[in-house]
Amino acid sequence: MSEDHIYIVGAGHAGGELAFATRQQGYAGALTIVGEESHLPYQRPPLSKAYLKGECEATSLYLRQLAAYEKANINLLLSRRVERIERASKKLVFDDGREVTYSKLGLTTGGRARRMTINDAARAERTSNFHYLRNIDDVMAIRARFEAGQRLVVIGGGYIGLEVAASAIARGVKVTVLEALPRVLARVTAPQMSEFYEQVHRDAGVDVRTNVEVIALDFNAAGDAVTAVHCTGGVVIPVDFVVVGIGLLPNTELAQAAGLEVDNGIVVDEYAVTSDPDIVAAGDCTNHPSVFCGRRIRLESVPNAVEQARVAAASLAGKPKAYQSVPWFWSDQYDLKLQMTGLSQGYDQFILRGSMQNRSFAAFYLRQGQLIAVDAVNRAQEFMVAKRMVAACQSFDPVALADESVPLKTLAGASGSSFSLRFAHRRWPPAVSARPHCPECAYWPVWRVAACFEHAARSAVAGKNFRATPGGSR
Amino acid sequence: MTIRLNVVDRNGGEHEVATAPEGSLMETLRELDYGVSAICGGMCSCATCHVYIDPDWLAKLPERQSDEGELLAELQFRQDNSRLSCQIQLQQAYDGLRLTLAPEE
């Protein structure tokens, strides 16, 4: 038996956190992070904000500086891609053909920018002024073009697109935002919020156009630059550069090719364990059970990446703890600090507290009376209260929510104190002991799989010790 | 040039940390293996870099801005000497600064 060596594939926020958290859990064996980029694990949120505006340097984005990795004895294999995972022999095969053996594996492969599918997209991607935005190199190229008077078309009116627009207009760039849906932020927020953000951007000088699809692009004679964007309705917009922000695709191909269960993300249980008990996964790439939502979800969020990575680390160290958290997000545009908690999809009531005109308000989303999400703009204090209120999974009086003379805190007062208590009334997921389990090893690998996926795959390996999750018994 | 910080971890352990007097206090604390998680990276959005400043030092630091005060106001483990370390820019004068890491919420 070779020595323990945990490999972490993916050097983003989740990967960096997973490595350090695994050390904090007491794992003393060899530990290596593998990343495709040349950078140490770094924070992505500033890429469309401070870093794009040139207000900070790449090294200040790093989660930790190199010395911290050396001190924690974490190896970094950067500018290196894992070609495939051979689970039967527990091997990773790199792009240069080299192979290593892992004892346990962490997949923190994140996601990549969704690419445009129009015919001209492939050609545009070979030009120098057509950009997606996901990593430091993308942003270096974009911000080099931020000069007063340059014409930018942002394709996509989501958070990335709008943050790029806000950063660009601050540098004197002429910005047009094109959104295919009838409103910006349509997937994530209420029409009232979309209208507010559209107005804010228009007031700042951004040309926001909704219900507009891009159908073709024009190129210069040399073919090395996009010169105009053709939209539905015959509109043609001349451009100096284009930034596309139309969503993220989870990087699941490596897991899928290795035979792990994948379904809009790498399928993991509440312990961040994949359908192979020796492989955990965390961050944007995972499809995980959310106790809070009562269903499986995939999140694109830093808090999720960090907190799920810690859960994954606990599993790697053999001290599993269940992942129970309420999603939250933030977005900074202009002078607006937007903080969001919960998921608003499926709401049937929208309550506004405060004034959109004054740029300070909180929006409450209710479903059948229960508070499921809050968006707070320039209301940090109420946001902190709202996090507790949303986590409580309770009903609140809509009239009181809208009434600024009633401090939010007094409404939240009765909310429970700990997650487990707050979630106690929920029926999903059922307790581990209530679930069907593998008769061979008592392992509950994946939610919807009643018996041990892994055991069946490896049944030929006699005497293999499978790790049992807590609550398991033979 | 470096300055020394006296950091008390969440288990009461005391550490002397040498750091350059630049950047935010949070950036130094997140390098420590017992340090702060600083999820939002210094945007004053998450309050996961919460520390207690030694009372003798409190008055020597610049006052809280409104965002910081608002986030702190609702924390379970808030004390009068609570600060968000991302909002404190290190400088030479802070040599010897003593602080305690607040429990995670």
Image: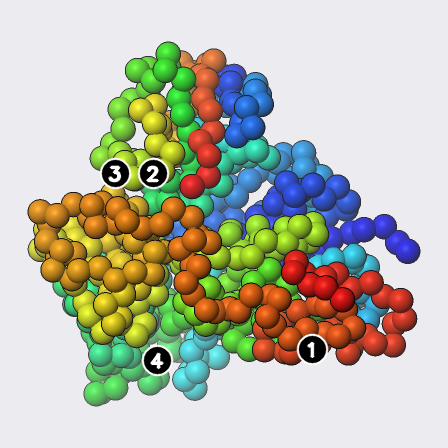
What chain does badge 1 belong to?
A
Could you tell me residue A388's position as x and y percent? 33, 50
Q: Which residue is mark 3?
A: B70
Secondary structure category for the residue under label 3: helix
Callout 1 and callout 4 share a chain: yes
**Number of numbered discs visible in the structure rendering:** 4
Query: Is residue A6 in view from this perspective?
Result: yes
What chain does badge 2 belong to?
B
Circle 4 residues within 10 Å: few <14, some 14–19, many ≥20: some
- Looking at numbered disc 2 in the image, what kind of residue is underneath it? Leu
- Residue B90 left/right relative to A354: right
Q: Which residue is mark 2?
A: B75
> How far apart, in angstroms, are the residues tagged by discs 2 and 1?
43 Å
- Looking at numbered disc 3 in the image, what kind of residue is underneath it? Glu
The residue that appears at 63% across and 78% down in the rendered structure is: A449
Secondary structure category for the residue under label 1: loop
Callout 2 and callout 1 share a chain: no
Could you tell me residue A78's position as x and y percent? 66, 52
Q: How is the image coloured?
A: rainbow
Dots 1, 4 in contact, CB < 8 A:
no
**Does residue A391 lie above or below A85 as drawn?**
above
Callout 1 and callout 3 share a chain: no
- Looking at numbered disc 1 in the image, what kind of residue is underneath it? Ala
Q: Which of label 1 and label 3 is nearer to you?
A: 1
Q: Nearer the viewer, residue A96 or A254?
A: A254
The residue that appears at 47% across and 49% down in the rendered structure is: A43
